[in-house]
Image (cartoon, rainbow, N blue to C red):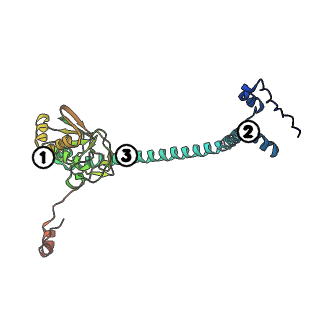
Amino acid sequence: MSQQPPVRSTGSPPPRPDASMSLLNNVMDHALDDGYAEATARRAAEGGGMPRPLRAKLGLAAGLVLAAAVVTLGAAQAQIAAPIVAKERQELIDRIDAETTAADELEQNVEKVRAEVGERQRKALEEHGGDQAELVALLSGATPVRGPGVKLVVDDAKGAEDGGGGPRESSGFADTGRVRDRDMQRVVNGLWQSGAEAVSINGQRLTSLSAIRAAGDAILVDNRPLVPPYTVLAVGDGQRLSTAFQDSADGQYLHVLQENFGIRSSISVEDEVRLPAAPSLIVRTAEPRGAGAAEATGEASADTGKGTS
């Protein structure tokens, strides 16, 4: 029996010289990452396209061009409308000036007529006042006066604001720091009761028929608005008048307003104060009735229980 020749095993191939550099070879064989390669292939399949940064720049440029166009159009429209607006504004200013001039003329006419009426009323008082003509003119405010007296200044509290409700509306006190018409009423009445012979507020002479009212937040004296501070001048014995007023109930009321609500006030004795005549007077006269007229109306008076004027 013949024997098979022994099979010689072939040896393994010798190792590559760069076997130890497999990582470097892998990097060189795959220079692009698979993700980049896939993205490149997808763009190629879609027919290419514009890079994203370039698209963003073009979009920004288009937006800027659109904004510039809008601004330019607005400026052009404003330039076209400017003459029309200027013309309308000038017409409005001319109308305001004309109406203001007309109102000033009417006010001057009113003041002129008021002065004439006041002068005639003063003459009537002088003619019919007899020996007491000067006293009647003084008490009625028909003539300017000067003499010793006091100067009382009343002003709103610092930073006073409009407000409503609170104790002022119910009890007569202030809760807003603003001087009200009833405050000035009490001040003036207190000066009269303390011995003042003549009184004025901000140059407005007060008489027995004068009215101090309110229109909103404004104080009116004989329907003429006044603004703070309110300067009250009173003719009389200065020191005595000042002391009597501060000790009176109305003087204490003003002190309470000052302490609790910040309303500012100051009083000083003056050697001489000057008060103007009242701008307008109301002359009322009474005539004695004859005996025959009294007898004729006596029965009617007895029946009604009311006198006649």
Q: Earlier in the sequence, mark 3 or mark 2?
A: 2
Q: In this orientation, does residue 181 appear?
A: yes
Q: In this orientation, does residue 145 appear?
A: no
| Disc 3: which residue | 111
As displayed, is residue 298 above or below residue 157? below
Of the residues shown, which amino acid type is indicated by label 2?
Asp
Q: Element type at marker 1?
A: helix
Label 1 crowd (10 A; few <14 / some 14-19 / many >=20): some
163 left or right of 43?
left
Mark closer to the observer (3, 2): 2
Q: Label 3 to label 2, Cα distance in Å?
A: 101 Å
Q: Residue furthest front?
A: 1
Q: Element type at marker 3?
A: helix
Of the residues shown, which amino acid type is indicated by label 1?
Ala
Between 274 and 251, the one lying in front of the other is: 251
Q: Name the residue located 41 percent from the left edge and 44 percent from the top edge.
A: 108
Q: Name the residue located 33 percent from the left edge and 52 percent from the top edge.
A: 215
| Disc 1: which residue | 249
Residue 241, given in percent of the width and then of the height, sits at 13, 38
Figure quadrant of the C terminus: bottom left
| Disc 2: which residue | 34
Of the residues shown, which amino acid type is indicated by label 3?
Glu
207 left or right of 244?
right
Based on the displayed image, in which of its 4 quarters is residue 24 positioned?
Answer: top right
Q: Name the residue located 18 percent from the left edge and 59 percent from the top edge.
A: 287
As displayed, is residue 262 above or below residue 110? above
Based on the displayed image, in which of its 4 quarters is residue 177 positioned?
Answer: top left
Residue 214, given in percent of the width and then of the height, sits at 30, 51
